[in-house]
Amino acid sequence: MRDVLVVDDDFMVAEIHRRFVEQVNGFRAVGVARTGTEALTAARELQPHLILLDVYLPDMTGLEVLQQLRSGGDRVGVIMITAARELDTVTGALDGGAADYLIKPFEFDQLKAKLEAFAARADALESADGVDQSLIDSLFGGAGAPSPQALLPKGLGAETGRLVLDAVNHAGEVSAAECAERVGISRVSARRYLEHYLGTGALEIRLQYGVGRPERRYRAMK
C-alpha cells in the first residue's frame, strides 16, 4: 500500500482528490495539507510515498515546497496538480524532480492513470536485480524504449495495448466506444487503456460538445 499526502488550499478540491486516491487500488490518502508549511511538516511526520502537490498555496508555491523537500534530502514522489499551464511552471516541476504533472480540473481516470504509472515505475525499480539500459529506457522514455507499452498497470496487457494504439492511429481519432468496437473489448476496458495512454502522454484528447456531457475523443499526441 502506498501512502499519499494531498496538498491543496481549497478544502473541497482537496477532499475530491483524497476520495479519488482512495478509489485506486494500492493507494491510500494518509493526510491533507492546505499550506506549504503544513505540507513540509506532514511530509516529515507521515513519510508518504507520494505527494499530490498544488502549485498555488497561500504561503509559498508548490515549486518552493518541492525545492525544500529535495534540498532536505527527501526523495518522496511528487505529482504536481495545478491549474497552471505556464511553460516555466511545468519546467520548474520537472527540474525540481516531480514524477509527473496533471492540470486540473481533471477526471478520476486521469489521476488513476498517473498513480498507476507511478506505482509501475516504483515496482520496476523495487523488483529489478540491477539497472540496465532497457530498464532505464522504459522508465525515462529513452531511445529505443517501448514507451507507450512500457509499465502497463495491473490488468492491462501489452498486446491489447498495442491493438488500442493501432486502432487510434488507424482511425485518427476515436471515442472509447469506437475503440472498443474496433479492438473487440468492452467499453470500460477500452477507456482504461485510453486513459492510461493519455496519462503517459502517448495520446491526447479533444472534447466534442453536443447534447449532454462532452464526448472524450482520443488521438495520438502530435
Image (cartoon, rainbow, N blue to C red):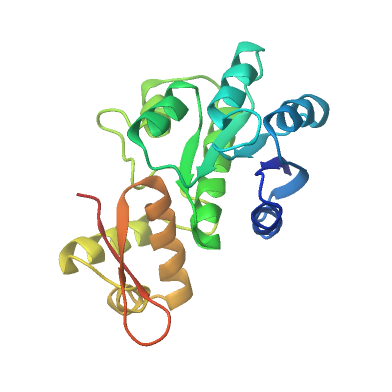
* Residue 143 in sight here: yes
Q: Nearer the viewer, residue 106 or 180?
A: 106
Residue visible at 41% across and 25% down in the picture: 136
Position of residue 96 relative to residue 22, above or below, is above
* Residue 122 position by quadrant: top right
* Residue 186 in sight here: no
User: On the rendered structure, is 60 left or right of 169?
Assistant: right
Residue visible at 36% across and 47% down in the picture: 149
Residue visible at 43% across and 68% down in the picture: 191
- Estimate the x, y position of residue 45 in percent, counting from the top left: 83, 27
User: On the rendered structure, is 83 left or right of 60?
Assistant: left
Q: Residue furthest bottom?
A: 211
User: On the rendered structure, is 12 left or right of 89?
Assistant: right
Q: Residue furthest right?
A: 45
Q: Residue furthest front?
A: 58
Question: How many labels, in total?
Answer: 0
- Estimate the x, y position of residue 173 in percent, counting from the top left: 22, 67
Position of residue 189 relative to residue 221, above or below, is below
Position of residue 67 relative to residue 175, above or below, is above
Q: Nearer the viewer, residue 54 or 219?
A: 54
- Estimate the x, y position of residue 26 in percent, counting from the top left: 69, 50
Q: Nearer the viewer, residue 189 or 57?
A: 57
Q: Nearer the viewer, residue 206 or 75?
A: 206
* Residue 36 position by quadrant: top right
* Residue 166 position by quadrant: bottom left
- Estimate the x, y position of residue 77 in percent, counting from the top left: 60, 31
Residue visible at 54% across and 53% down in the picture: 111
Position of residue 220 relative to residue 168, above or below, is above
Q: Give the quadrant of the N terminus.
A: top right
User: On the rendered structure, is 211 left or right of 60?
Assistant: left
